[in-house]
Image (cartoon, grey):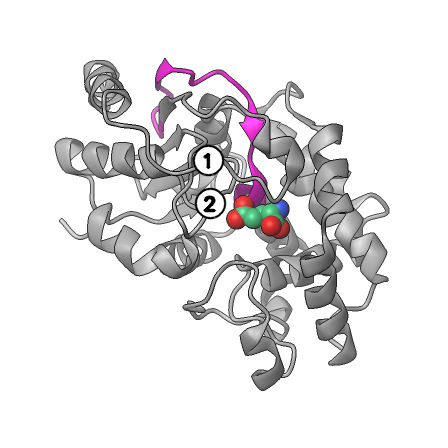
Amino acid sequence: MSADFAALLQTIAAEVTALPPEGDVADYIPALARVAPDQFGIAVATVDGRLFRTGAADTPFSIQSISKLFALALALQREGDALWRRVGREPSGTPFNSLVLLERERGIPRNPFVNAGALVITDVLCRRFLQPERAVLEFVHRLLGRTSVGIDADVARSERRHSDRNAAIAHFMRSFGNLQAEVGAVLDAYCAHCAIAMSCAELAEAALFLAADGRQPGGARVLDAADARRLNALMLTCGAYDAAGDFAFRIGLPTKTGVGGGILAIVPGRLSVCAWSPRLDANGNSVAAAEALERFAAAAGVSIFG
Ligand code: GLU
């Protein structure tokens, strides 16, 4: 039986919410600028079926880039290793929405978690599914075993109306032949899957397969064990953009962050943990959620580096 994390989560929530607020909510997507900034939640799901949560752990928020993880897992299921001809596996050292490396690297994004890489993954899904964003949503439903999660249409519309930068990235990659669908269709699907709304508890539960060698809690296989391991490696090296090194140093776990303020972390073999708080640092990562995960990894002794 796994450890009881209830008291630890409460202590962390009390400590982190007592810190002076730092950072700002994302405002380049207008609908996200309206979110109350000082909310905080954290949830832990263990591979032996326990769920611990505290604070606003059941409040749905915009998962944004955390959706790139689900999109990638789904694309890997369908496309297998052929995917890696179109997207790399190296940290970029540049902001999540940067264009600078794309010209030098001939339209091949550094990794699937920077926006360029996620747009390529979404392009793969556009070819495989008539409604790619629904395919991502239904994949999440299968992971959760329920259909309680949806796409926030306001957030999707708001991002789509302000997607000039992602449009530029997509057109640029298309000019190199690394985008097959129409740019508009890829952006529609991308903005919609980024706008999936989930709570910390739902994200921790949905991501458990990454802590369990690619299997869901009931035993169903999502990815083979090698792909689950590779996804964790990508999260560790690329999941927090150009703060990935700092996150490995501070937290020591595979993580995926989103500009909605969520951070999901995996403890292979044991659990998944998700913290959420909307104020972001300059890299677009939640300040309080990172702080909470740093404290959790240290106190529970679960860093992958011992
Ligand atoms: N939908 C966001 C964008 O494309 C995702 C960024 C993020 O969460 O890091 O800008």
Judged from the image, the secondary structure of the residue bearing numbered disc 1 is loop
The N terminus lies in which quarter of the figure? top left
Left or right for 214, reference 296: right
Looking at the image, residue 137 lies above or below residue 10: below
Q: Position of residue 181 (x, y in %)?
A: 83, 63
Q: Circle 1: is it few (<14), some (14-19), or many (20+) Cα within 10 Å?
A: many
Q: Is residue 163 visible?
A: yes
Query: As rendered, which of 240 and 160 lies closer to the eye?
Result: 160
Return the mark for residue 214. 2
Question: In front here: 180 or 286?
Answer: 286
Q: Which residue is mark 1?
A: 261
Name which residue lies at 68% across and 35% down. Answer: 137
Residue 261, percent from left and from top? 46, 35
- Amino acid bearing label 1: Gly
Q: Earlier in the sequence, mark 2 or mark 1?
A: 2
Q: Is residue 210 left or right of residue 254?
A: right
Q: Number of labelled discs?
A: 2
Q: Residue at position x 20%, y 14% from top?
A: 7
Question: Element type at marker 2?
Answer: loop
Residue 142 visible: no
| Left or right side of 24 for 191 | right
Up/down of 202 relative to 118, above or below = above
Q: Nearer the viewer, mark 2 or mark 1?
A: 1
Q: Is residue 151 magenta?
A: no
- How far apart marks 2 and 1 lie (CA) works out to 26 Å
The residue drawn where x is 38% and y is 45% is 281
Callout 2 crowding tier (Cα within 10 Å): few <14, some 14–19, many ≥20: many
In the drawing, what numbered circle is on residue 19?
none
Start-end of magenta stretch: 45-69
